[in-house]
């Protein structure tokens, strides 16, 4: 367990006036700890979904909501949505109960951002997510490829895959954006408003219906659901792109009571700026009520951009196996950009078989666009 292996007894037995961390020794661990998934963070209070060990692990929303705080030894450690944590104390989840987080389990991925490219201060946005869903409107507001590129870079750097969700396809065609992103291995999915979708809805009960909002074409919502199933997905998007409409369609308000609402602090869409994890219902049919869920949708109301100062080219290249291999032949310190002298990636196009040339060129130019987005601005 390495450096995480510091527990409360450690801290108390060796208080350090200078604030340096006590050295880890063999100490009794919290053998009574249970594991919880962090689904929300609000002013020092963490909402956890705790499952009993003998529950089957495969996705019903059984389990209880536990509110917790960090144990003292974790004061300087960031616990984020998506973290798997060990908790002790009152883990009953009863009203007014407060448990203690004593350990963070090793993360499989960390989605980071730098506040600004000139400011190296790094934040972890979400832990253990599989996929970044970039929600972009095809119109109103106009798509901004700079923003999309930066999200793609942040995701690949984090070891996550990317789903580009293009909304408002009723207003404009997705073809151009598809052509820009599919060469990068980015999956694309498209949503649109239902042909009769009106703000006041129809008979009600449609899968695509958002409470008090516009109705999305149900089949487009279900296509998105299919891409999210079984995964932990983080949704990002600029204001007005239709992210809330989509999330409401995927996870109707009624379903949200399960797993996330924290009665101690409450959570308002307009007050919370931190991420929140919502269990993704397997199906939302009203006549077949079920708590079954399969996957998590993490909304990130506070994330409007990704500063990328922390991203290294070499690390980004890892996400592109073919290019990475070719780039081994590059001169030392090659930037791999279009103006880089003797960049082996140019060669790779040159010696490409005719029937692959166009695809390679598209991939390389998309990749170079990503590279330069590291230093660009997304304004
Ligand atoms: N034409 C059309 N409009 C849509 C679609 N999806 C959402 N909208 C509208 O776009 C506007 C913005 O949608 P929201 O879901 O509030 O957007 P958001 O991304 O959550 O933005 P914030 O609430 O500002 O964070 C609303 O007026 C929606 O009704 C769509 O597929 N087609
Ligand atoms: Zn190069």
Image: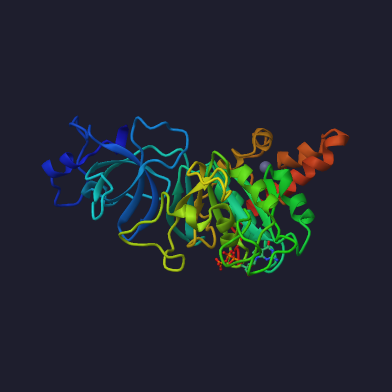
Depth check, front residue: 324 or 270: 270
| Residue drawn at 82 percent across, 35 percent down | 352
| Residue drawn at 33 percent across, 53 percent down | 46
Depth check, front residue: 44 or 368: 44
Residue 267 locus on image (x, y percent): 40, 62
Q: Is residue 122 left or right of residue 220?
A: left
Image mark count: 0
Residue 250 locus on image (x, y percent): 57, 52
Depth check, front residue: 305 or 130: 130
| Residue drawn at 35 percent across, 56 percent down | 262
| Residue drawn at 27 percent across, 35 percent down | 5
The way the protein has been coloured in the rendering is: rainbow
Image quadrant occupied by the C terminus: bottom right
Report if residue 158 is visible in the image: yes
Depth check, front residue: 294 or 354: 294
Among the 4 quarters of the image, the one containing residue 346: top right
Q: Residue furthest right?
A: 354
Report if residue 333 is visible in the image: no
The quarter of the rendering in which ligand 1 is drawn is: bottom right
Q: Is residue 313 left or right of residue 62?
A: right
Image quadrant occupied by the N terminus: top left
Residue 231 locus on image (x, y percent): 54, 40
Residue 232 locus on image (x, y percent): 51, 43
Q: Residue furthest left?
A: 13
Q: Is residue 24 left or right of residue 373?
A: left
User: Does residue 246 sit above or below 131 in this rendering?
Assistant: below
Among the 4 quarters of the image, the one containing residue 156: top right
């Amino acid at each position: 367990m390495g450096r995480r292996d510091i527990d409360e007894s450690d801290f108390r037995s060796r208080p350090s006036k200078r604030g340096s961390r006590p050295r880890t020794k063999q100490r009794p661990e919290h053998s009574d700890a249970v594991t919880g998934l962090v689904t929300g963070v609000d002013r020092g209070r963490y909402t956890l979904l705790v499952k009993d060990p003998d529950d089957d692990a495969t996705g019903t929303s059984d389990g209880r909501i536990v509110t917790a705080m960090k144990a003292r030894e974790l004061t300087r450690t960031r616990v984020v949505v998506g973290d798997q944590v060990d908790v002790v104390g009152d883990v009953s989840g009863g009203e007014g109960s407060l448990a203690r987080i004593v350990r963070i389990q090793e993360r499989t991925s960390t989605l980071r951002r730098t506040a600004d490219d000139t400011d190296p201060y790094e934040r972890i946005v979400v832990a253990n997510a599989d996929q970044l869903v970039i929600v972009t409107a095809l119109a109103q507001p106009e798509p901004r490829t700079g923003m999309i590129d930066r999200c793609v870079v942040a995701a690949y750097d984090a070891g996550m895959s990317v789903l580009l969700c293009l909304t408002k396809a009723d207003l404009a065609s997705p073809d151009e954006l598809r052509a820009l992103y599919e060469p990068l291995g980015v999956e694309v999915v498209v949503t649109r408003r239902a042909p009769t979708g009106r703000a006041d809805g129809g008979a009600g009960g449609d899968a695509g219906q958002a409470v008090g909002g516009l109705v999305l074409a149900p089949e487009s919502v279900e296509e998105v659901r299919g891409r999210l199933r079984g995964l932990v997905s983080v949704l990002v998007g600029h204001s007005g792109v239709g992210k809330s409409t989509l999330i409401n369609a995927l996870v109707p308000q009624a379903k949200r009571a399960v797993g996330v609402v924290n009665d101690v602090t409450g959570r308002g869409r307009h007050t919370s700026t931190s991420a929140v994890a919502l269990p993704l219902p397997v199906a939302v049919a009203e006549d077949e009520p079920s708590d079954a869920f399969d996957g998590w949708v993490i909304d990130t109301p506070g994330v409007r951009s990704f500063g990328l100062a922390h991203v290294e080219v070499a690390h980004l290249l890892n996400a592109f196996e073919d290019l990475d291999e070719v780039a081994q032949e590059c001169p030392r310190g090659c930037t791999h950009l279009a103006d880089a002298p003797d960049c082996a990636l140019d060669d790779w196009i040159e010696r490409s078989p005719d029937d692959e040339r166009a695809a390679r060129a598209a991939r390389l130019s998309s990749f170079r666009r990503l590279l330069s987005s590291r230093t660009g601005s997304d304004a």
